[in-house]
């Protein structure tokens, strides 16, 4: 291997590591913001600025999608097909498009569908961005206005994402970058007046898994939790949530400390851990705990799913994984449901 090739490979590895670290820290920051929004919404339900808190919360979820896109670009995020709201994908694409095209280009979206699609959300958003970038290159000088429109087609069997701009020139086919991904998700792209339209099949089911929540008395008034989280601000938010829900929380700051606490104070009703922990990853700690106690309920939080996390799920080592940033009520309801299912 030549010196240049070695240098290029080193740069790519460095980019992967840096992107992974940035995305992890960004997800933690977003989780803290989301947590404080939910606390304010819960403690001050009559707050006059409640609608602003909802907008902040929505922006947090969009920021989480951007963090996933950063991981995908550095090959840290595998292709994950799931059922997602089509409007979530379009909103993520709009944010990416604004960042990539710059302030000189005006972008806006019109959303008129609540249907779900079966895609990798980050890759699908990137497809929309790439198609819009292809279109932008055909625009005449002085035209910097691109519109995205999400609508329904074929009797709600498909969603249509239109990408248009006045004066856009004809594009004969999808670019080589887009074409293979379109085929993979069963989507098609066609020329329309002043632009392009991507047709994506609708998923018959939503991605929301309805977990049967237990009656309060079936879980018990007092429950114990081992919380493994190195970010103090985020750990404080989780502890506030769990204390209000009737949990006694033992907090470990890394994976090694988590194993020590489990050995000395366990078992717990539930173990909640982040994957990216100092000294020992959450999935590694989960394997050690599962070896000693296969019945232990373990919930794993992560900014992305890799092979370690997937194998933990497949082997039944962890009960479930949640992608950060996660809404606190979703986290609490998931924990309670899995505790009830194993009781």
Image (cartoon, rainbow, N blue to C red):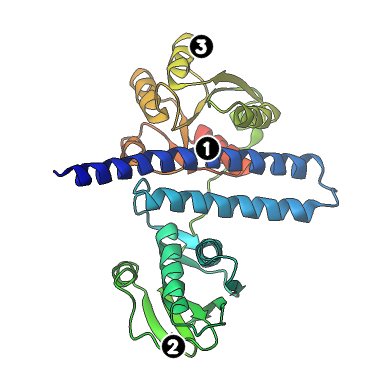
Element under disc 2: loop
Is residue 201 in view?
no
Residue position marked by numbered label 1 in the rendering: 25
Residue position marked by numbered label 2 in the rendering: 169
Coordinates of residue 121 in the picture (x, y in percent): 44, 59
Viewer-side label of 2, 3: 2
Can you say whether 254 is above or below 283 in the image?
above
The tag earlier along the polypeptide, 2 or 1, is 1
Place residue 142 in its image quadrant.
bottom right
Element under disc 3: helix
Coordinates of residue 330 in the picture (x, y in percent): 59, 44
Q: Residue 265 got which mark? A: 3
Coordinates of residue 100 in the picture (x, y in percent): 50, 63
Judge left or right: residue 316 versus residue 4: right
The residue sitting at the top extreme is 264
Can you say whether 131 is above or below 77 in the image?
below
């Amino acid at each position: 291997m030549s010196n240049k090739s070695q240098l290029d490979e080193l740069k790519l590895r460095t980019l992967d590591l840096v992107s992974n670290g940035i995305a992890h820290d960004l997800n933690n920051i977003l989780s803290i913001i989301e947590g404080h929004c939910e606390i304010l919404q819960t403690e001050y339900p009559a707050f006059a600025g409640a609608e602003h808190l909802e907008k902040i919360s929505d922006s947090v979820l969009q920021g989480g999608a951007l963090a996933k896109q950063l991981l995908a670009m550095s090959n840290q995020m595998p292709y994950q097909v799931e059922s997602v709201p089509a409007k979530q994908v379009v909103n993520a694409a709009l944010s990416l498009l604004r960042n990539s095209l710059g302030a000189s280009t005006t972008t806006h979206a019109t959303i008129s569908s609540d249907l779900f699609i079966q895609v990798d959300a980050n890759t699908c958003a990137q497809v929309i961005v790439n198609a819009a970038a292809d279109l932008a290159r055909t625009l005449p000088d002085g035209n910097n206005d691109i519109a995205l429109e999400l609508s329904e087609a074929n009797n709600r069997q498909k969603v249509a994402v239109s990408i248009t701009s006045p004066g856009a020139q004809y594009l004969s086919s999808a670019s080589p970058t887009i074409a293979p991904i379109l085929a993979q998700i069963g989507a098609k792209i066609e020329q329309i007046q002043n632009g392009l339209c991507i047709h994506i099949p609708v998923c018959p089911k939503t991605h929301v898994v309805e977990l049967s929540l237990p009656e309060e008395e079936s879980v018990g008034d007092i429950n114990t939790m081992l919380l493994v989280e190195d970010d103090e601000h985020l750990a404080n938010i989780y502890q506030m949530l769990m204390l209000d829900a009737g949990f006694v929380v033992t907090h470990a700051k890394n994976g090694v400390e988590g194993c020590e606490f489990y050995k000395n104070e366990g078992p717990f009703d539930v173990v909640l851990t982040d994957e990216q922990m100092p000294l020992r990853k959450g999935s590694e700690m989960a394997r050690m705990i599962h070896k000693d106690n296969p019945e232990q309920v373990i919930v794993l939080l992560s900014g992305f799913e890799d092979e370690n996390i997937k194998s933990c799920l497949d082997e039944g080592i962890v009960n479930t994984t949640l992608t950060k940033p996660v809404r606190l009520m979703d986290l609490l309801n998931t924990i309670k449901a899995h505790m009830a299912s194993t009781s």
